[in-house]
Image (cartoon, rainbow, N blue to C red):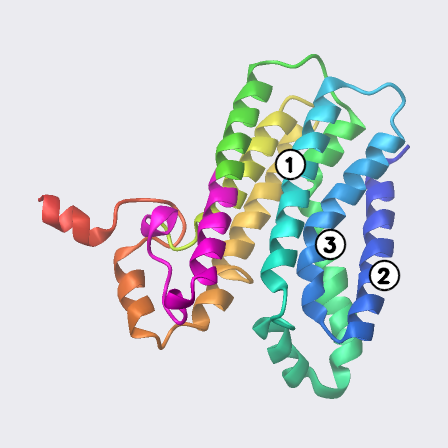
Amino acid sequence: MNVFLLAGAVLFLFMSMVFVIAMTVKDNSIVDIAYGLSFVLVCLVLLFNLDGGHPRQYLVAGLVSLWGVRLAVHIFLRKQGEGEDFRYRQWREEWGETFVWRSFLQVFMLQGAVIFVVLQPVLLVFNAPGEGLGLLDGAGLLVWLFGFTFEALGDWQLLKFKKNPKNRGKIMQTGLWRYTRHPNYFGEATLWWGLFLIALTVPWGMVAIASPLLIDFLLLKVSGIPMLEAKYENNPEFVAYKSRTNALIPWWPKQQQETTR
């Protein structure tokens, strides 16, 4: 079994199916729900094709599946009653007559390609699981647990904040959001570094560094922080929040640092 070809085929078929559904319901943002589910699907297919299996293979598949299910459920619940996400609506307007084919290539196929790269720690472990579990696996698991908890807690705090009618139009600045403008993104970036540490125990494991590096790049420079914060660039409350709070890595707000001096 060539795990790389199998994963690529699964992603292509799944993303093509999601594309057809998106065109039918006229909502490209369902790809955000499919994002987490695609990781789970690949892991399930790989597990189904295992002959015996290694504890490390079950470990990475279990961690990624847990993360993928939680993320998909969270985005599904958050999306209820909101229609297509503003980023996808903007592309729908900008692309005009080229919308269909550009959606297929630039949203769904590109998403599939990104997922394939991010999945490298899992694919490398399934390709050659290496020797027994060791300290590096334990360290990777601890880093993953920290990142997963940080991401899940940040998402939960924001969801709870938005459900309160008194907070309509306000910027979340409490809980984990007091120390970083994007605790969910920080958590996600962290957990993939944990999976990279686990992958270091297998042959060619260093190649898996492409996974966390791509996640970091996308969150910091492309579809994460830049696109989301552009929506609030003219909001005075957000401008003040941005001036004192780190974008990704948690730290004390700048005003508090100055006060303690």
Pointer 3: what residue?
113
Q: On the image, numbered disc 2 is attached to which residue?
A: 17
Magenta region, residue range: 150-179
Check disc 2 and give the amino acid type: Met
Give the x, y percent position of residue 47.
83, 31
Magenta stretch containing residue 153, yes or no?
A: yes
Please report the residue visible at 52 percent of the width from the left and 55 percent of the height from the top. Answer: 219
Horizontal and vertical percent for residue 203?
A: 71, 24
Kind of residue sitting beneath label 1: Ala
Magenta-drawn stretch, dominant element (helix, strand or loop) = helix
Disc 1 target residue: 208
In this view, the residue farthest toward the bottom is 97
* Of residues 232 and 102, the one drawn nearer to the viewer in this rendering: 232
What quarter of the picture does the N terminus occupy? top right
Q: Nearer the viewer, mark 2 or mark 3?
A: 2
Q: Amino acid at mark 3?
A: Ala
**Mark before the other along the chain sequence, 2 or 1:** 2
Tell me: 14 left or right of 80: right
| Residues at marks 3 and 1, CA–CA distance in whole angstroms | 15 Å
